[in-house]
Image (tube, grey):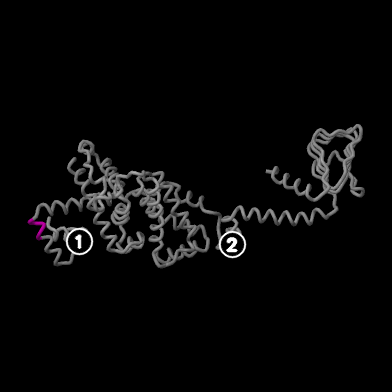
């Protein structure tokens, strides 16, 4: 195939022949078997390649894509920002909560009890929690801003924040017992309980 | 149709996931088909096509009306496919251009085993063979052939997707066609 015909052939395959070129090309194909075979082969091949288009996306495709999208975003919203910087966001939130709780809850004098209060005797005015004689407190007992008198039994850990523990001779605590008096210990305790809360 | 599409794109840009879902429905077949014909593996193609949509979603704010949405989507998908192919490629590739010759590949120099081709008779096998042969084309020619003949896109669209001038796109179609023709001839003979 001559160079000229090769160019015509490519143009014909691209569908870019002018009317005059088309005439010349058709005339040439009638004379030249090689060019004709070549042209027909490529045309046939293109038809076969085009047949490869008959596939479609698998079932559930769209749902799978939607599942992978981040939950509804708005441009530059704080939530989107947090999604892009999860660690910074977590640290920032933690810091804010930490500082605010430090200042608010360390200074309040309200007595707070964590644990099942059913078996406890609570004396709010005197800031006192009593585990009465003969009673058994099951689980961990945490008391803030109050003293704890154990006359009965505590089956678990006792933690007292800004308070004292009085253990009567008949009383017993099966777990650990600790008193927290300063802000550093208290912060450490809060941190630990945050982590272990998961 | 045009205006519905524009509305969907506009809403999706504002963060409307339902609108984006509509866009996925509209283009999933084309994008999946492109990925499958580029990669040749159904699972990988599905992964890649999904990745393309997720990437499009994340970058919606960067899309402007300069190109059709489909062009933009095709570009993301094509680039992802090419990245994947490059990562998969072994150090020593049959498709890699030879440093000594001008653009030819090792693959072209090895004659196809006539015996292997003689067994190819059934239509399905023939289709698979053609897909295989397309998969063996170097990426740039493969992309051109797929976009042109399977996706049926215009040279201008292809130029925008491939980020190349129209004459270069044309050259790639010609070259890809020539490379494919050589193996196709053998498949035909074996019938």
Specify few, some or many for label 1: CA neighbours under 10 Å numbering under 14, 14-19, or 20 or more: some
Q: CA distance from mark 1 to mark 2?
A: 54 Å
- Closer-to-camera residue (B10/A197): A197
Q: Position of residue B103 (x, y in %)?
A: 26, 53
Left or right: B130 as drawn, with respect to B49:
left
Quick check: can you spot residue B150? no
Left or right: A23 as drawn, with respect to B176:
left
Please identify the quarter of the rendering in which residue B27 is found. bottom left
**Which residue corresponds to mark 1?**
A11
Output the chain of dot 2: A
Q: Position of residue A23 (x, y in %)?
A: 12, 64
Residue drawn where x is 72% and y is 44% of the image: A192
**Which residue corresponds to mark 2?**
A77
Quadrant where the N terminus of chain B sits is bottom left
Q: Position of residue B190 (x, y in %)?
A: 18, 40
Left or right: A29 as drawn, with respect to A84:
left
Output the chain of dot 1: A
Rendered image: mark on residue B44: none
Residue drawn where x is 87% and y is 41% of the image: A165
Find the residue positioned furthest to the left: A31
- Per the rendered image, the range of residues in magenta is A27-31
Residue drawn where x is 51% and y is 53% of the image: A69
Main structural element of the magenta stretch: helix, strand or loop? helix
State how many labels appear.
2
Find the residue positioned furthest to the front: B100
SS at circle 2: loop
- Membership of B106 in magenta stretch: no
- Closer-to-camera residue (A151/A107): A107
Quadrant where the C terminus of chain B sits is top left
Specify few, some or many for label 2: CA neighbours under 10 Å numbering under 14, 14-19, or 20 or more: few
- Closer-to-camera residue (A55/A49): A49
């Amino acid at each position: 195939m001559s160079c000229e015909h090769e160019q015509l052939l490519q143009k014909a395959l691209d569908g870019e022949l002018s009317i005059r070129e088309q005439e010349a090309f058709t005339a040439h194909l009638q004379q030249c078997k090689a060019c004709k075979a070549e042209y027909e082969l490529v045309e046939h091949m293109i038809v076969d390649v085009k047949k490869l288009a008959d596939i479609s996306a698998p079932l559930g495709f769209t749902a799978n894509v939607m599942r992978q999208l981040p939950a509804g975003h708005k441009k530059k919203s704080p939530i989107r920002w947090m999604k892009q910087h999860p660690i910074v966001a977590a640290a920032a939130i933690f810091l804010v909560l930490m500082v605010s709780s430090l200042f608010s809850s360390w200074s309040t004098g309200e007595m707070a009890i964590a644990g099942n209060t059913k078996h406890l005797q609570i004396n709010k005015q005197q800031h006192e929690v009593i585990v009465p004689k003969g009673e058994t407190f099951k689980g961990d007992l945490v008391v803030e801003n109050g003293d704890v008198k154990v006359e009965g039994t505590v089956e678990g850990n006792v933690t007292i924040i800004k308070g004292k523990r009085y253990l009567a001779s008949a009383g017993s605590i099966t777990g650990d017992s600790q008193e927290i008096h300063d802000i550093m210990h208290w912060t450490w305790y809060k941190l630990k309980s945050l982590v272990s809360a998961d | 149709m045009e205006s519905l599409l524009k509305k969907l794109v506009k809403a999706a840009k504002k963060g409307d996931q339902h609108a984006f879902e509509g866009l996925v429905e509209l283009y999933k077949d084309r994008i999946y088909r492109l990925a499958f014909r580029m990669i040749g593996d159904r699972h990988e193609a599905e992964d890649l096509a999904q990745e393309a949509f997720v990437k499009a979603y994340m970058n919606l704010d960067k899309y402007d009306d300069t190109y059709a949405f489909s062009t933009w989507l095709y570009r993301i998908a094509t680039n992802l496919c090419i990245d994947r192919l490059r990562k998969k490629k072994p150090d020593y590739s049959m498709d890699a251009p030879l440093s000594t010759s001008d653009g030819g590949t090792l693959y072209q120099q090895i004659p196809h085993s006539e015996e292997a081709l003689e067994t190819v008779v059934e239509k399905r096998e023939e289709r698979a063979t053609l897909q295989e042969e397309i998969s063996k084309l170097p990426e740039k020619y493969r992309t051109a052939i797929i976009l042109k003949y399977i996706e049926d896109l215009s040279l201008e669209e292809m130029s925008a997707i491939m980020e190349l001038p129209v004459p270069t796109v044309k050259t790639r179609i010609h070259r890809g066609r020539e490379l494919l023709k050589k193996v196709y001839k053998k498949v035909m003979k074996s019938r």
